[in-house]
Image: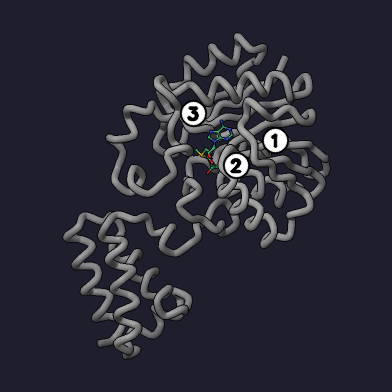
Amino acid sequence: MNCTEVISNAVYILKENLIKNPYLDSEMLLSKALKIKRENLLTNLNMKLTNEDIIKFNKLIERTKKKEPIAYILGYKSFWKSNFKVNHDVLIPRPETEHIVEEVLKIIPKSASYNVLDIGTGSGCLIISIILERKRSRGTAIDISKNAINIAKYNAKIQHIGNRIKFVNSSVDKFHRGKYDLIISNPPYIKNFRINYLEDDVKLYEPKVALDGGVDGYSNINKVIIKSSKLLKTKGKLILEIDDKQKNTTNKILKQNGFYTNKIVKDLAKKYRCIVSTKI
Ligand SMILES: C[S@@+](CC[C@H](N)C(=O)[O-])C[C@H]1O[C@@H](n2cnc3c(N)ncnc32)[C@H](O)[C@@H]1O
């Protein structure tokens, strides 16, 4: 069989199993099985495959069929301008989270040296993207998950900025170190009873600790805001990702803790997603 033939078989299987991007997924997974770039695959679609290649590819398609996210199978996800290593210990970086990076880059001038804290760093996608863009700034990133911290450290190392970000395995409530110009966080904010109703790819494969926002969804949002009110310098900024429906309550919590809300940014789906505030 050649590449076109195995891809069309795989597309058929994935479509039957209601997988969202059957063509792209099949091409990416065949590239992985053959250890070649997708561009090279697409220019060599007549290439004959060995049995061993086909078995390897079919195993990857089996995983996709069971709704495992393609990023976990490939082992990486692209975010902002880089690829980030991911595994089941970290949330897969989402495109909507890039709004935090956009907002941060509007705030930190290119030549400034800000001290930035990332609470709940996961793969490190946020702090690493920011520190890569702002060469004079430095960062600290914390996460309650030791395994996530190890992945984030690895991602910083392969971007050659391991020495500009301190990674700390700590819960937000136990972290007391430093004073920051800017704090960012994409905390877990889903009400815990709703986790069972999420899509299978999220519910079955992504870490619960990265999703679970407690009974009302605000458990971590609260902790992050309270901690930020202590660790931010006056006039420092806090930039948070939230769910669309959390805008008003988050605003209220910010106000109660001495923050002024500068703006609330909508994502491409027109949902309120990112809230920029200043410690008064
Ligand atoms: C929604 S994920 C965000 C990951 C990454 N920042 C991103 O945007 O892709 C939330 C992260 O917060 C971490 N986390 C959950 N509870 C925490 C806590 N109490 N203190 C610190 N980190 C926590 C989780 O382990 C997870 O990595």
| Number of marks present in the image shown | 3
Q: Which residue is the site of mark 2?
A: 121
Q: Which residue is the site of mark 1?
A: 117
Residue displayed at 37% across by 28% down:
192
Q: Which residue is the site of mark 3?
A: 242
- Residue 19 is situated, as x and y percent measured from the top left of the image, at 26, 56
Q: Dot 3 lies on which element?
A: loop
Residue displayed at 24% across by 81% down:
5
Query: Which amino acid, mark 1?
Result: Leu
Mark 2, other Cα within 10 Å: few <14 / some 14–19 / many ≥20:
many
Q: Nearer the viewer, mark 2 or mark 3?
A: 2
Q: Quadrant of residue 138?
A: top right
- Marks 2 and 1: CB-CB under 8 Å? no
Which of pointers 1 and 3 lies earlier in the amino acid sequence? 1
Mark 3, other Cα within 10 Å: few <14 / some 14–19 / many ≥20:
many
Query: Which amino acid, mark 3?
Result: Ile
- Residue 227 is situated, as x and y percent measured from the top left of the image, at 66, 22
- Does 244 sit left or right of 225 as displayed? left
Quadrant placement of the C terminus:
top right
Mark 2–mark 3 Cα distance, whole angstroms, equals 15 Å
Q: Dot 2 lies on which element?
A: loop
Q: Nearer the viewer, mark 1 or mark 3?
A: 1
